[in-house]
Image: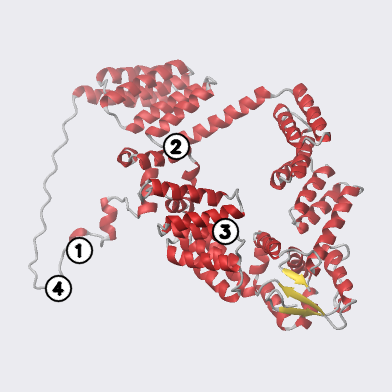
Amino acid sequence: RTRLGAGVWAVPRRSSFRAPPKDSIFDRTFFPLLSSLSARCSQRLVLAHLMPLPRLISDMQGNAAFASGDFQTAVDKFKQAIQLDADNHVLYSNASASLLSLKDYTQALSYAEQCIQKNPGFVKGYTRQGAALLGLERLDEAEAAYGKALELDAGNAAAQEGMNMVKEAREGGGKKSLFLDPQNLQKLMLDPRTRSFMSQPDFMSMLKACEEDPNKMQEFMKDDRMKVVLEVIFGLRFADPDELMKEDGGDATAASIPPAGSSEKTEQPKVPEAEPEPEPLSDDVKRSLEEKEKGNAAYKAKDFDAAIAHYDAAIALDPENVSFVTNKAAVKFEQGKYDECIADCEAAIEKGRELRADYKLIARAMTRIGNSLVKQGKLEEAIRIYNKSLTEHRSADTLERLNNAERALKQAQEEAYVDMGLCTEEKDKGNAAFKAQNYPDAIKHYTEALRRGPPSVNEEAHKLYSNRAACYTKLGAWNEGLKDAEKCIELAPEFGKGYSRKGHLQYFMKEYTKAMQTYEDGLKHDPESQELKDGLKRCIMAINAQNSGADELTEEERQQRQERAMADPEIQTILQDPIMRNVLRDMQENPASAQKHLADASVAAKFEKLVASGIVQVR
C-alpha cells in the first residue's frame, strides 16, 4: 500500500457515504470501484495519494516560476520538492534546467548527474548534462552526453541541437556567440518586452546580420527593438539625460551644494553660456510654411483642389522640404488618384535620399505607396513595399497595414481557389484511399477538398474534418486529429460523429476524464449512438483499472500520466484551492472525516476529478 512512498488515506465503506446524484461520473466510476473492493476488505478501503501534498505544491510552484522566468525561485521550489520526494528523477531534471538558465553550470551538472543516477533511461537527464558540460566548455564530455541521449532517442531535437552547438563551438575555436547564443535567445524568449519579436522574420534576420558582422549593430540602432535587445541581454540602459539626472538625485545644482558646516569651499554655480540664436527664416521659407498651413486647412475641409494648389505653391518656394510633397500625395490618395499619389511619393523618397532627410519621412512615403497599391488590389506589391518601409522605421500603423494586407491576400487566394466540383472529386478520392487503408493519401485528398470547398461556402465541410480526423487517428497523430475533431464540432455541434472522433482521440491519449465528458456531450445530441455509448463504457473501465492498479502501467507511464494531470489548469486550480487542501489534509489525518467532506457536492466533484486524473488512487 505504500510502495509509491506516499501518505495513506483510509475511508469508510460505501454504505457510510451519502449518495451523490444519480448518473454522475462519480457514481459510475468511484463508488462502483469501492463496492468491488469492499468485498475484499473487511474493515476499510485505502486511498493512496500519488505524492505528499507539499511536494505537489512545490513542484507546481517551481514550474510556474520557471515559466515566468523567475529561475532562482524555480530552483528553490524544485529543491524543496526534492527534499520531500528524493527519488523523483524529473525534479532533478527541472532543477538542472533552472540552474542552466541562471548559467550556474556546475550545480546544473550536479543535478543532471543525479537525475541520470535515479533513472538512467531518462533522455532529458543526458541533454541537461550535455548543456551543463557545454556551458563549462568541456566539449568532449558534452558530445558524449548528447550522444547517449541520441542512443536512447535518435530523433530527440534537443540532443541533435546540442550536437550542432558542440560542433559550432569547436569550429569557432571557443568564440562566443553574441545574439544567437542559446542562453541569450532564451532571455529574449522569456522577457515580455522581446517575446513577440522572436516570431518576426525581419528581427531574426537583424540578429543574424549583427552576429555575422558586429559593425552592423550601429546601423540597426535606429530600430528601437535593437535597444531593447541590448537592455535584455547585456543590461545596458538607454535613457534621456534628464532621466539619468533624476535617478542620480534629481536636481543637479541641488546635489552639488555641500551640507551645512562643511569646510569645503562652495563653488559659485556657473552661468550657462547663451545659446546661439537660430538663423532667421528666409522670406521664401516663411511663405512656404504659410502655404502649407493653408493647404492643411483646405485638406481638412476636403477642398482637395485648393489643397493641391497651396502645396504646389509651398514646393515652388521651398523645394527641399520633402513633407510638402508627401502632403500633396495624401491629397491625391483621398481623390482616388493612386498612380499620381505613388508618383509623388516616389519623388519624395528620391528627394529625401538626396537631402538625407529623416528616415521617418521616407518610411511614411513608402507606407503611402503601399496604401495606394492596396486600393488598386496589388496586394503582393503592397506587402513588399510595407516591409521595405518597416526597415526604414518600424511603425505600429505600418505593421498593422502589412498584417491586414497579408490577410487580405490570403483570403483572396483562398476565394480564387474555391471550386465545389473539384471539392467533391477530392472528397471521393479521399474516401477511396481511406477504404484502401492508404491514410496519408486520404489526408492529402481531404485537405485539398477543404481548400476547394472551405466552411464559408461548404455546408458539408464538417464531414471533411471528421474524415480527416479519422485518418489521423489511424496514423496515431493524436494532436492533429484532435484539432480536426474540435473543428468539426465547432462547425456542426449537433453532429454526433464529431464527438465520437474527439472522444476516441482523447481515449488514446489516456485523457479518460475528458473523453468521458466528450462522449456525454455527444449523447446529448445523439442519444441513440452506440459508438458514443461504447466509448463511455471504455472510459469508465479504464479509469477503474487505473485507480485499482489493474492497468499494469510502468513507472514511466505513471509519471507521464501525472505530468499530464499536473498540466491541466483545472487540476492545478483544485490543488491550489485552500479548502480542498484542508479537505485532503483532514482526510489523510482523519479518514472518518471523508463522509462529512464528500457530502458536499462541490467537494465531491473536485475529489472525483483528482481520482479520475490519477492524482489520487484507490489501493
266 or 167: nearer the eye?
A: 167
Residue 67 visible in rendering:
no
Q: Nearer the viewer, mark 4 or mark 3?
A: 3
Earlier along the polypeptide chain: callout 2 or callout 3? 3
- In the rendered image, residue 281, in percent from the top left (x then y), is placed at 19, 28
Residue wearing tag 2: 202
Lower sequence index among marks 3 and 1: 3
Q: Is residue 127 left or right of residue 313?
A: right
The local crowd at label 3, few if under 14, some if 14 to 19, many if 20 or more residues have their Cα within 10 Å, is: many
Q: Residue at x 76, y 27 (%)?
A: 426
Residue visible at 49% across and 51% down in the picture: 162
527 left or right, relative to 115: right
Compute the Cα span from label 4 to label 3. Answer: 65 Å
- Sooner in the amino-acid sequence: mark 4 or mark 2: 2
Element marked by disc 2: helix
Labels 4 & 1 near each other (Cβ < 8 A): no
Q: Residues within 10 Å of mark 2 (few under 14, many from 20)?
A: some
**Mark 1 — residue?**
255
Q: Which residue is mark 4?
A: 260
Q: Position of residue 428 (x, y in %)?
A: 81, 28
Task: Kindly report the distance in space between the C-alpha atoms of the residues bearing marks 2 and 3.
Answer: 33 Å
Which residue is found at the position 71% from the left and 26% from the top? 452
